Image (cartoon, coloured by chain):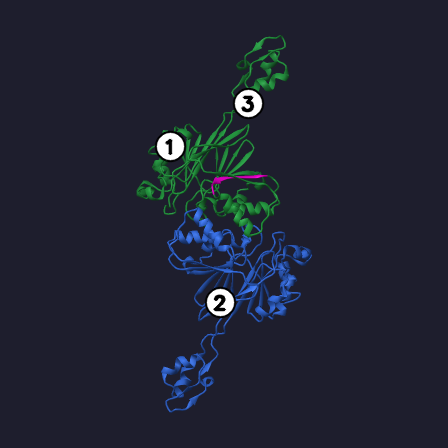
Chain colours: A green, B blue
């Protein structure tokens, strides 16, 4: 998996501080997560290929997470896109986009498929043979979901020399990669473990923004490799969290620790702070493996 | 008058090519004309003060002219704006903005007043004692208006030495500036022309985008000091104008010539062209005083 934090600030887009948008590349997919104003320009800047984006996940309908969506869809239209586009987001997102398209008489040539979300429980919203995507219901002022991306198990690695030595016909190699024991050409049952090793480990990524400190997400994100959790404030402004339903860096770290995640990435910083390192320092008082999202920064998962 | 072309390209915003937005400063007003995606970031970049914008004029509801409006209004809200905001634009613009605000539960503390336009005739849509704004109905695929900004007459310049020599009481100076003849302290009628000269000349600016070649606008924009007229294409692509309802640089110049304007500014260039000087060269075969809009360029009118 490769994650690019296209924009990582809260509230209003500024010249060099873009609002939330992320690109997650995983097993041939290019998933776009949230789409603040100007995301399409930032995608161009970071050389993300527009025609590879087939699934867009919108956490909630605050402007800093969705105002760039209509512009991106409109650009897809102007680029003569033909591939289907799936948009997952809160109920109302279809009305929002369709009204704008109707008023601008912008008829598209591709299928635009909305998956409107209303559930307060985690649900599976996308699945193929390589990956699954689940919602992570969050606690914000507005109906909001995070998203959990879980790669399915990769094939086991076949040790060809050993398989040949055991006289296994190549016709069985696919079954071996899938983990099965097979009969060799002498009719003997060969244990899978004798001729294969672990494949590439499957990875998982959880995106959680925007949300107050919310322990209900812990069972859903438990043991993920990487957790992105919003940290709008530092503890010096913890008093603002209740009203705005945002988190501090320390609270994000507490969630990371309780969910025993591999790594925590912080983002969605309020513009009142000049030194982002303070977020890292605060989080590391609770959980050691912390990184900071920055506009255009890439993380290998 | 001072005009800043915040963005001057057509279709889709790119890293260094912003879609249509202009700021016209005139006699204490800061008018925003069109508002493509990312306009708020460009306004910050060019140091336009947000709280001075009280009137926004939207020509039509294609995305490259309006997708930045909701973001700008949303930012005004986050900045705790209190001043009224007037938005002039096609019928439907209120529904578009209000739906987005409803879905994001973004309640504002300032009066947001929509002036929805439907007329196919030019109409006066704003007036105070300093300036008036009229619509310029255009010929595009969608209901579209340009806008004509006409400063009202400035006061005449009082020649104080001459007024004193003519024994005019200072109480009459205001009337003199307004152009009246007055009685002096000996009861003699003093001709205004004897003690005043012309004031600062009033200026006018016409914004015409997007439109096909459309002679019906000529009586409305006749003799304006500066005309901005879209030039999406060069004559080499004149065949595209009928379908897309856009103009070539030469057609823009023909309108400028027939309307005997002072200066023509071209913009709304298609991204297919690399050399903008070609637009100027083509227009100058018809009309000599031509300038090119560029992102962030300022014109004194």
Q: Is residue A144 magenta?
A: no
Residue B17 seen from this side? no
Magenta residues, start to end: A84-91
Query: In the depicted view, which residue is nearer to us: A239 or A99?
Result: A99
Along the line of sight, which residue is nearer the eye, B281 or B3? B3
The mark found on residue A216 in the picture is 1
Q: Which residue is mark 2?
A: B1
Identify the secondary structure beneath mark 3.
Answer: loop
> Label 2's element?
loop
Percent coordinates x, y for residue B22 in the rendering: 51, 59
Alpha carbon distance from label 1 to label 2 = 58 Å
In primary-sequence order, the first of circles 3 and 1 is 3
**Which SS type dominates the magenta stretch?**
strand
In the rendering, at what x and y percent does residue A5 appear?
47, 40
- Label 2 Cα crowd, 10 Å radius (few <14 / some 14-19 / many 20+): some
Q: Secondary structure at mark 1?
A: helix
- Chain ID for label 2? B
Residue B250 percent location from the top left of the image: 65, 62
**What distance separates the C-alpha of mark 3 from that of mark 1?**
33 Å
Q: Nearer the viewer, residue A241 or B162?
A: A241
Q: Which residue is mark 3?
A: A155
The residue at 55%/61% (across/down) is B145
Chain letter for mark 1: A
Q: Residues within 10 Å of mark 1 (few under 14, many from 20)?
A: few
Left or right of A237? Residue A20 is right
What is the CA distance from the residue labelled 2 to the residue labelled 3?
Answer: 69 Å
Callout count: 3
């Amino acid at each position: 998996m490769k994650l690019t934090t296209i924009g990582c600030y809260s509230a209003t887009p500024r010249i060099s501080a873009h609002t939330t948008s992320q690109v997650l590349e995983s097993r041939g997919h290019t998933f776009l997560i949230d789409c603040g104003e100007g995301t399409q320009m930032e995608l161009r800047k970071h050389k993300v290929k527009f025609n590879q984006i087939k699934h867009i996940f919108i956490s909630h309908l605050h402007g800093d997470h969705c105002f760039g969506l209509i512009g991106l869809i409109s650009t897809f239209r102007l680029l003569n896109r033909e591939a289907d586009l799936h948009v997952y987001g809160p109920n109302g997102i279809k009305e929002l986009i369709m009204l704008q398209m109707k008023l601008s008489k912008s008829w598209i040539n591709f299928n635009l498929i909305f998956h409107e979300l209303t559930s307060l429980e985690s649900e599976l919203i996308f699945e193929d043979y390589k990956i699954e995507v689940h919602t992570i219901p969050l606690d914000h002022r507005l109906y909001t979901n995070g998203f959990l991306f879980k790669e399915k198990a990769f094939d086991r690695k076949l040790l060809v020399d050993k398989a040949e030595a055991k006289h296994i016909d190549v016709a069985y190699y696919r079954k071996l990669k899938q983990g099965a024991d097979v009969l060799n050409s002498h009719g003997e049952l060969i244990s899978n473990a004798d001729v294969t090793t672990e494949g590439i480990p499957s990875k998982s990524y959880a995106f959680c923004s925007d949300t107050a400190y919310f322990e209900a997400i812990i069972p859903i994100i438990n043991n993920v490799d990487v957790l992105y959790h919003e940290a709008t404030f530092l503890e010096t402004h913890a008093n603002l969290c209740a009203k705005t339903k945002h988190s501090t860096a320390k609270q994000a770290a507490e969630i990371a620790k309780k969910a025993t995640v591999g790594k925590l990435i912080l983002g969605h910083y309020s513009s009142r702070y000049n030194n982002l390192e303070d977020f890292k320092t605060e989080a590391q008082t609770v959980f050691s493996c912390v990184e900071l999202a920055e506009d255009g920064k890439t993380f290998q998962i």
